[in-house]
Every structure is written in C-alpha cells, then in structure tokens.
Image: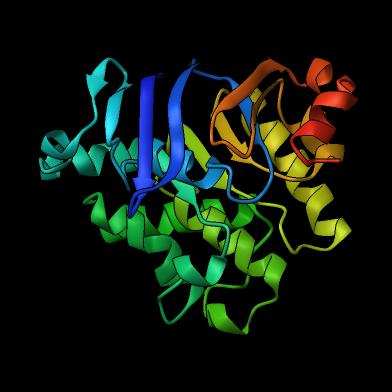
Amino acid sequence: MFELTDVSYSYNERPALKSINLKIGKGESVSLLGANGCGKSTLLKLINGLVVPDAGTYLFDGKIIDRKTLADVTFSKRLHQQVGFVFQNSDTQLFCADVFDEVAFGPRQMGLNEKDVEKRVSETLALLGLNGFENRHPYHLSGGEKRKVALAAVLAMNPDVLALDEPMNGLDPRTMRWLAEFFTRLSGAGKTLILSTHNLELVQEISKRAVLFDEDHTIVADLPSSDLLKDIDLLRRVNLL
C-alpha cells in the first residue's frame, strides 16, 4: 500500500527524515521505533498526507502523493478516509462539544445520512466500550477515555489503515493492556497498522515487523519484531535502552 523512495523532509532546514526507503503492504502491522525526535511522527504525518516530501517519492496504492494530488479535494478526502491518523496528544484531535458529535464528524463529512451516522457512531462506541458516553464532553474524560474517543472518531470512517502516534503514551497499565489487545484484534480483522511507540514490552504483541530509526533520522533496521528486540546492542546504540 505504501512505497517511499529516498524520501526526505525538513522543518525549517532541520532534517526530520533522511533518504527513507520503506514499503508497507496491506494488512501488515508495523511498529516504528527510535528515540524522541528521530522522525517517527513525521513519517506518520507524511503517510497521512499532512506533510509532503521535500525530496523523493511517496506512493499510496500506486498513486504519487504530493502537493498537486493533495490539492484535489476529492482525492485528499479519500486518502484521509482510507488512512486514519490518531495523534499522540488526544486534546489536539478532539474539538466537538460532546462525544457523539466527535465520532459523527467523519461520517458526516463522508456524506452519510443521519440515520447511518447514528448507526456508525453507536457501533463504534460499542466496539471501544464507550456506550453511554454520547453526551459527555471530551475534555471532561480521563486520558485513556480521550484516547479511545480519538480512536473511535477515526474508526467511524472505517479506514483501511490506522496510523497511530505513540498510542500508549501516558496511559495506565490497564488501558495499555486493553489497547494492545484491541490493536491485535484490528490486525486480525485485516486492518493495516502503523504505529510509533517507545513501549518495547508491547512491540512484539502489537506488531509483526519493526522499523528502527536512529538519531540521524534514517532507518537502521527493518526486521521481524522478535528479531529486532533481541538485538540489545543495536537498541542501546539508538538510545532505546
């Protein structure tokens, strides 16, 4: 589904990604690993079309993703429907007055009628164990509940791909365990998962493949998760241990 060839990206001339070559197929579950600031979040934003490469090419389903293609409103809307992005900070993503409208926003933008919107919201909230949250204000929820609502808002559009930026960050152990099992179920249902994480204990459980970045913003390893986690020297070299 995704093919990046010699992709680079900088923020005000500060490199975030350097000569990235990466392919991710449909149905894969991939963890992005590396120290803070190595480029994981930028890669997820690029995959989702929130930023475009300064150099190199990015193909999604064989279609080049660049400023020109993203300027096509129809194509851009379809890309963001197919590739759902869950931000690291849920407060960045939540903006509606109640949980129902938060989860309904995407399906409404897709043009679903209100009856189908209500059905989609109800099913998605049930999937995440959020029944009864419809009228609650997102900012009054706990950190774990906010994360689930942000995830529900993305899942309500039924994306093929979930791109998740540090989905376990700041959560209590029980919520992390619940999310890990939930991601495993999504992967088993055929969803493509791409997530950045520092939680090495859960990497092998939530992904079959791990891509490791170093602090020079390049990929230094792309291996089965179990193999990468055994390379203690490499993990220490990139400051993950």
In the image: residue 65, left or right of residue 227: left
Vertical arrangement, residue 174 with respect to residue 95, above or below: above
Residue at x 52%, y 47% (from the top left corner): 41
User: Is residue 75 among the parts visible in the rendering?
Assistant: yes
Residue 194 placed where, x, y %?
56, 33
Residue at x 57%, y 36% (from the top left corner): 216
Q: What colouring method underlies this structural image?
A: rainbow
Query: Which is nearer the eye, 141 or 111?
Result: 141
Vertical arrangement, residue 149 with respect to residue 210, above or below: below
Residue 68 placed where, x, y %?
11, 36
Quarter where residue 73 is shown = top left
In the image: residue 222, left or right of residue 41: right
Residue 150 placed where, x, y %?
53, 60
Quarter where residue 21 is shown = top left
Residue at x 10%, y 40% (from the top left corner): 72
User: Is residue 189 among the parts visible in the rendering?
Assistant: no
The quarter of the rendered structure image containing the C terminus is top right
Query: Which is nearer the eye, 184 or 236?
Result: 236
Residue at x 70%, y 76% (from the top left corner): 142
The quarter of the rendered structure image containing the N terminus is top left
Quarter where residue 76 is shown = top left
Vertical arrangement, residue 80 with respect to residue 222, above or below: below
Query: Which is nearer the eye, 70 or 83?
Result: 70
Count the marks.
Answer: 0
Residue 33 placed where, x, y %?
68, 36
